[in-house]
């Protein structure tokens, strides 16, 4: 059996809940991607073009600083990476994380949460951000109410 790690970024707690369920199902560790400056409700206001998240997402080169860049990536074969979908893709803070590590020979499996948007072309972006050295799956969108059994069935194809 391959060794898996669940990495996630969650601004409101929804993705964190799915990540926790997934990690419990796989009986593995989690690693939280945390921005140095946490996002406030005002920062997350997508209807405000000047909100922090709106500004970051318009700038494809934006890389918000993260608290800890010591994820044990080298110890794992499969990296499940979860995040909310912002503006049809992964948040820029996730990009910061992805560019910090060597994913050579790893399998990266994205999972996301969203109020409406799907996962879209995120796997292609992740492949590019990690230097095209990992196998990146297309990933899947889940709701916070996803059952442990559904997560287990989905995750077992990778481990």
Image (cartoon, grey):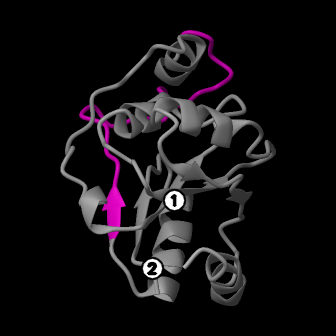
- As helix, strand or loop, the secondary structure at mark 2 comes to loop
- As helix, strand or loop, the secondary structure at mark 1 comes to strand
Q: Which residues are magenta?
A: 30-50
The residue at which mark 1 appears reads as 107
Please give the label number shown on residue 34.
Answer: none
The residue at which mark 2 appears reads as 2
Q: Residue at x 52, y 36 (%)?
A: 132
Marks 2 and 1, how far apart in space? 10 Å
Q: Residue at x 20, y 45 (%)?
A: 68
Q: Quadrant of residue 127?
A: top right
Name which of mark 2 and mark 1 comes first in the sequence: 2
**Relative image position of residue 115 (x, y in whole percent):** 75, 48
In magenta segment, residue 84:
no
Would you say the residues marked 2 and 1 are in contact, meaning their CB atoms lie under 8 Å apart? yes
Q: Quadrant of residue 111?
A: bottom right
Quarter of the image for the C terminus: give it: bottom right
Q: Quadrant of residue 89?
A: top right
């Amino acid at each position: 059996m391959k060794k898996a790690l669940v990495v996630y970024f969650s601004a409101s707690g929804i993705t964190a809940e799915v990540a926790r369920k997934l990690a419990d199902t796989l009986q593995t560790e989690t690693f939280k991607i945390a921005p140095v400056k946490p996002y406030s409700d005002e920062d997350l206001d997508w209807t405000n073009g000047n909100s922090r998240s709106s500004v970051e997402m318009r700038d494809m080169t934006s890389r918000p600083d993260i608290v800890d860049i010591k994820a044990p990536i080298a110890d794992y074969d499969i990296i499940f990476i979860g995040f909310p979908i912002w503006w049809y893709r992964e948040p820029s803070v996730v990009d910061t994380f992805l560019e910090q590590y060597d994913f050579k020979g790893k399998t990266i499996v994205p999972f996301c949460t969203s109020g409406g948007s799907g996962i879209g072309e995120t796997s292609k972006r992740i492949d590019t951000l990690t230097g095209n050295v990992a196998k990146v799956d297309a990933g899947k969108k889940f709701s916070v109410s996803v059952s442990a059994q559904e997560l287990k069935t989905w995750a077992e194809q990778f481990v």
